[in-house]
């Protein structure tokens, strides 16, 4: 089987590495890729915002499967175009990708499917937003309805800041704002593979969305992750599949827009029980880097089965006992206006750190140098028998990286290592 991975982030680099470990995959290629992916496989230039170009490249290369990494191309119809060309694609249609593309659509699907989520008001005027802030109370959760790369969400106690963010979102063409009830409690990301009928959960992970230590600073695409979650209730995965993902997949099929690919459930474990914070229609970044580091089953076989309606026939995924921690190294000024063009040094030493793997995101070759070309530049993954060892490996490798002005969090997985993550007791019934 020959597989094309579409994208250029560390998530896609992790997918490439996973496919290279699958003996059933004879060739992996990537487009457009980055400096790290280009060192592992052949990469091809590609405009990922052009679905027809993706389908043409897949046909020209004669691949058996296309794996689309990011939500942008999916919402634009990348999977529809690839499937129309007669090639299997891991990723939902544009219609099903609305599960991520529109928070209002996701809320509607959850309401129809009886999936537990926050109360929300969909607003098209500032007055409606202010009424919703009054109704739902502080902290105010203000979300841009459309895609915003994880940066469209503001959670604040500050009324003027909430109003200003709402106004900025409304000012966009067709701007809509979702105001939500605040959900307290630890967050979990669970990825479930689906072919539209069968649902196969992977292992849960936790993501660190804020830029600075202590969960301070602005929301980002994600600054780090770890898996597994030793503090999570033993029945968490079953509960999420039964109460959240299966009903959602069934509701999408009932609407005539079956979902094929990965449903990413972003969840809060609140004192009132499990609640969905958001759905994404693709693998999470950086959670994928830690989840795939622990996958022992052939990745290509799972993704191909999801893409071709045969997931029920594939054995359940097997997992390593190891723990994985990912620390993101971001450019200066990320997430606002990341500085690019800095040389990324120390990659060799970082890569030789025992227990560590360096995955590339916003990197490119400039002559014989590697330079930064994006906000999140590297994902450094450490593995080990426990969180302390995995964190030590990841941070030792991060310490070798020399990127002027770079930013990373120093507390990824620290409260879990210290046993300080508290799950509220489950409510009765
Ligand atoms: P989203 O893009 O919807 O995942 O939101 C980004 C981050 O904002 C989430 O991972 C949470 O940390 C936070 N967030 C979003 N919605 C809520 C909510 N209703 N209650 C509490 N935190 C939230
Ligand atoms: N890690 C968050 C995301 O992928 O959206």
Image (cartoon, helix red, strand yellow):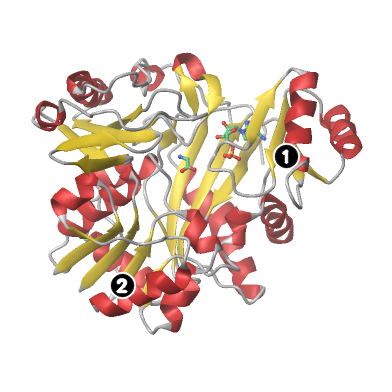
Instruction: Return the x and y of residue 414 as percentages of the image width and height.
Output: 36, 18
The label on residue 169 is 1
Q: Quadrant of the N terminus?
A: bottom left
- Residue at horizontal 25 percent and vertical 68 percent from the top: 3
Disc 1 residue lies near ligand 1 with CB under 8 A: no
Q: Which residue is mark 2?
A: 65
- Is residue 149 visible in the rendered image? The answer is yes
Image position, residue 386 (x, y; %): 23, 26
- Residue nearer the viewer, 324 or 344: 344
Q: Quadrant of residue 154?
A: top right
| Quadrant into which the C terminus falls | top right
Circle 1 crowding by C-alpha within 10 Å: few under 14, some 14–19, many from 20: many
Whether 170 is drawn above or below 242: the answer is above
Left or right position of 29 against 55:
left
Quarter of the displayed picture in which ligand 1 can be seen: top right
Residue 84 location in percent, x, y?
A: 45, 82
């Amino acid at each position: 089987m020959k597989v094309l991975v579409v994208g250029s982030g560390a998530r896609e680099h992790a997918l490439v590495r996973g496919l290279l470990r699958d003996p059933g995959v004879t060739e992996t290629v990537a487009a457009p890729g980055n400096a790290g992916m280009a060192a592992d496989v052949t990469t091809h230039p590609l405009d990922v915002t052009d679905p027809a170009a993706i389908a043409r490249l897949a046909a020209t290369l004669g691949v058996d499967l296309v794996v689309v990494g990011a939500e942008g191309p999916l919402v634009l119809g990348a999977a529809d175009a690839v499937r129309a060309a007669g090639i299997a694609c891991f990723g939902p249609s544009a219609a099903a990708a609305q599960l991520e593309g529109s928070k209002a659509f996701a809320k509607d699907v959850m309401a129809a499917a009886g999936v537990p989520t926050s109360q929300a008001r969909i607003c098209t005027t500032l007055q409606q937003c202010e009424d919703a802030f009054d109704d739902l109370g502080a902290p105010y959760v203000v979300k841009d309805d459309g895609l915003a790369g994880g940066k469209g969400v503001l959670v604040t106690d500050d009324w003027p800041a909430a109003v200003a963010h709402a106004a900025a979102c409304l000012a966009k063409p067709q701007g809509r704002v979702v105001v939500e009830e605040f959900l307290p409690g630890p967050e979990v990301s669970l990825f479930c593979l689906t072919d539209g009928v069968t649902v196969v959960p992977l292992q849960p992970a936790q993501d660190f969305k804020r830029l600075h230590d202590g969960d301070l600073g602005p929301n980002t695409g994600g600054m780090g992750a770890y898996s597994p979650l030793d503090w999570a209730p033993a029945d968490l995965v079953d509960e999420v599949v039964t109460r959240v993902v299966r009903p959602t997949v069934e509701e999408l099929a009932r609407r005539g827009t079956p979902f094929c690919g990965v449903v990413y459930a972003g969840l809060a474990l609140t004192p009132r029980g499990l609640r969905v914070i958001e759905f994404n229609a693709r693998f999470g970044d950086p959670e994928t880097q830690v989840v795939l580091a622990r996958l022992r089953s052939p990745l290509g076989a799972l993704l191909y089965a999801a893409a071709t309606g045969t997931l029920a026939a594939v054995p359940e995924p097997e997992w390593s006992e190891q723990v994985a921690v990912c620390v993101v190294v971001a450019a200066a000024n990320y997430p606002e206006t990341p500085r690019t063009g800095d040389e990324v040094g120390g990659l060799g030493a970082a890569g030789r750190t025992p227990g560590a793997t360096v995955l590339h995101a916003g990197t490119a070759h400039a002559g014989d140098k590697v330079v930064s070309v994006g906000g999140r530049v590297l994902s450094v993954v450490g593995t080990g028998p426990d969180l302390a060892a995995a964190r030590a490996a990841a941070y030792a490798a991060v310490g070798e990286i020399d990127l002027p002005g770079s930013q990373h969090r120093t507390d990824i997985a620290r409260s879990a290592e210290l046993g300080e993550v508290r799950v509220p007791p489950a409510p009765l019934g």
